[in-house]
Amino acid sequence: MNRLQPVRIDHTVSDTLAEIKDKVCACIQCGTCTGSCPNAFAMDITPRHLWRMLLMGQKDEIFTSRTFVLCSSCYYCTLRCPRGLPLTEAMSDLKQIAAKEDMIPHRPSTRFYKCFMDSVRRHGRVREAEFISTYFLSMSATDPLLPLKYASMGIRLLQKRKLALKNPLQKMSERSLDVVFKKVEEMENQI
Amino acid sequence: MNYLYYPGCSLEGTAREYNISTRSFMKAAGIKLTELEEWTCCGASAAASVSPLLSSALPAINLAVAESMSQTENLLIPCSACYLNLKNVEEKARKEPGLLKRINKVLAEKNLNFKNRTKVRHLLDVMAHDIGAEKVKNLIKKDFSHLTIAPYYGCQCLRPYPVFDDPEEPVSMEPLIKATGALVHSWNMGGKCCGASHMNTKIDVGLELVYGILKAARGADAIVTVCPMCQMNLEAYQDKIELKYKENLNMTILYLPQLLCLAMGMSEDESGIESNMAVTKTFKEKMKKLPK
């Protein structure tokens, strides 16, 4: 019997979405992901729609939408996808592109993660006070009032002895992961 | 039964009472925990949003340290986010030999080698299956039969890897709750999402999710959790939810081992309950007036 050859999607070398497309190319548009997503109510385009846009290479539309930053990694879609696609991972991949390209509308999320990782890089473990103050600094141009939104929570955490006020921005700790981060950057840039 | 222990960053700070009560509970159950030497951050939910290799390398550092400490002991992790990050590497490195190589190229910078031999275990898995409700029952000194407890599992100890419970309709906490004499609140929100870090960057979305959970818990005396992020989201925003939805949904939120420590008659210091952000007056009064 003659069988059809599987069709490979043609990626151009510069296509930053190529790897993510590969992950979702078997999507059958059933919408189980959308129906399972706890955050779908707040999304401007549904997850099902997003996968289609991804396969059509609509990069601008994907990144002007806030759908992928609204993924809270609950893994319902990954668990239930009838094609077994790693959809939560694909959402993270989109977040990585938004972070790498420092896209302005997604900065509240991407910089939050970046400042967190910077603190881990310096000390091996996250230092919450340092992490949150560098986040405020990095967001000060877009949202100068941001610290106020966190103030009452900060006070409550201090009262409950849940926040260690170690000298923020002190020099790197012995536990620093700087060499690890450097090696990862070097290896990821080689690709 | 001994375990290697990875507390993770939250348990040093915002979830200090989870650390305190886990250690107290394990001590009472006769289990020795050996904290991982010089453990480092697992990458939380941040690393996967920044770099794929980093999100594998950071958990692998800790797995490599665990391997160097013990060939036989499982690695016990109370935080669901840490658990999933480490579990993810365990699973992926098994399926993708290329990844193991890449990870070890990074780990060489720290003179570590990762062979993927350590078994990663969530605290709830160990409590429910290694220790078990029968053993817990023998340690209980108080009667909680006048309390109704809502078990809240959250996402990342259940999904995407259904290791020790049903990923959609989890039940593993129920025998442990019943061991205290308490009733289990009947609801279908146990495995639903708390919004995770949305509370920090997209608070309206986070509030909506937590509102749904707290509302469904009505009628229970407390919700018990097994994840620092779930705990914080459920306990710390109740006043904001009341302001936004004009409904008072105040609810006591405890970590599962805290509930068991209380039922074992432990002190506030041992259960860490003075660090909780939502313990209602009604709950405190009920605790004072135990049935026996």
Image (cartoon, grey):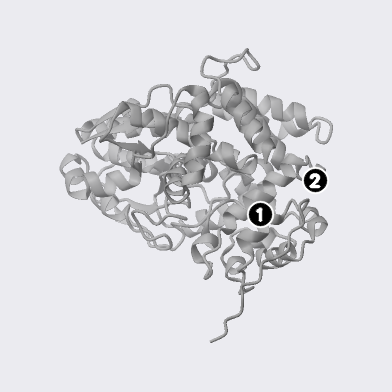
Task: Identify the image quadrant of residue A188.
Answer: top right
Instruction: Name the residue that disc number 2 marks.
Output: A105
Q: Circle 2 sits in a helix, a strand or a loop, which is it?
A: helix
Using a 10 Å C-alpha cutoff, classify the residue at mark 1 as few (fewer than 14 neighbours), some (14 to 19) or many (20 or more).
few
- Residue at far left of view: B138
At 57% from the left and 41% from the top, the residue drawn is B45
**Amino acid at the residue labelled 2:** Pro
Same chain for the residues under marks 2 and 1 in the image:
yes
Q: Circle 1 sits in a helix, a strand or a loop, which is it?
A: helix
Q: Which of marks 2 and 1 is in front?
A: 1
Quadrant containing the C terminus of chain B is top left
Residue B24 sits above or below residue B45 on the image: above
- The image position of residue A63, as x and y in percent, is 78, 53
At 72% from the left and 54% from the top, the residue drawn is A17
Quadrant containing the N terminus of chain B is top left
At 33% from the left and 34% from the top, the residue drawn is B22
Comparing A180 with B179, the one in front is A180
Task: Identify the image quadrant of residue B86.
Answer: top left
Chain ID at mark 1? A
Instruction: Name the residue that disc number 1 marks.
Output: A19
Using a 10 Å C-alpha cutoff, classify the residue at mark 2 as few (fewer than 14 neighbours), some (14 to 19) or many (20 or more).
some
- The image position of residue A152, as x and y in percent, is 64, 31
Is B72 on the left-hand or right-hand side of A174? left
- The image position of residue A107, as x and y in percent, is 76, 40
- The image position of residue A177, as x and y in percent, is 56, 24
Comparing B51 with B105, the one in front is B105
Task: Identify the image quadrant of residue A87.
Answer: bottom right
Comparing B67 with B175, the one in front is B67
Mark 2 or mark 1: name the one nearer the start of the chain: 1
Tally the marks: 2
**Amino acid at the residue labelled 1:** Glu
- Residue at far bottom of view: A1
